[in-house]
């Protein structure tokens, strides 16, 4: 029987977006500042473009994501980064 994986949903804000070269390929990561007090988290965002060719994620965007943690003490993994949309014209 395998180890139990703890799955948690979290919310944070993108503090930086950086390109990182791994071997011959370059990929982009968003540095997310979690609202729940966890340390900074790097989440792979790939090309970070919409179908029209515009950037999708920006510094300052509020995002939600899933964190997978192994109780054995391994580093957590983040998945499913998506924007949190807030109604701005709400009365």
Image (cartoon, rainbow, N blue to C red):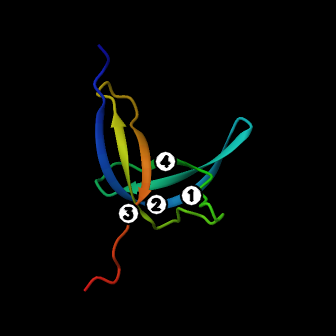
**What is the number of callouts on the image?**
4
Label 4 or label 3, whichever lies nearer to me, is: 3
Spatial CA distance of label 3 from label 1 is 17 Å
- The crowding category of the residue bearing disc 1, from other C-alpha atoms within 10 Å (few below 14, some 14 to 19, many at least 20), is some
Do tag 3 and tag 2 residues touch (Cβ < 8 Å)?
no
Spatial CA distance of label 3 from label 2 is 11 Å
Location of mark 2 (residue): 14
Q: Furthest residue to the left?
A: 91
Where residue 11 sits in the image (x, y, percent)?
Answer: 33, 56
Do tag 2 and tag 1 residues touch (Cβ < 8 Å)?
yes
Location of mark 1 (residue): 17
Residue depicted at x 28% and y 25%? 4
Which quarter of the figure has residue 49? bottom right
Spatial CA distance of label 4 from label 1 is 9 Å
Instruction: State the SS at label 3.
Output: loop
Spatial CA distance of label 4 from label 2 is 10 Å
Label 3 or label 1, whichever lies nearer to me, is: 3
Q: Is residue 61 left or right of residue 17?
A: left
């Amino acid at each position: 029987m395998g180890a139990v994986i703890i799955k948690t949903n979290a919310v944070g804000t993108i503090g930086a977006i950086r390109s990182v070269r791994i071997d011959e390929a370059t990929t982009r990561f968003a540095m997310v500042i979690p609202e729940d007090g966890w340390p900074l988290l790097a989440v792979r965002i790939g090309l970070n473009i919409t179908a029209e060719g515009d950037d999708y994620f920006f510094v300052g965007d509020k995002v939600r994501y899933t964190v997978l943690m192994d109780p054995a003490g391994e580093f957590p993994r983040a998945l499913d980064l998506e924007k949190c949309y807030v109604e701005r014209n709400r009365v």
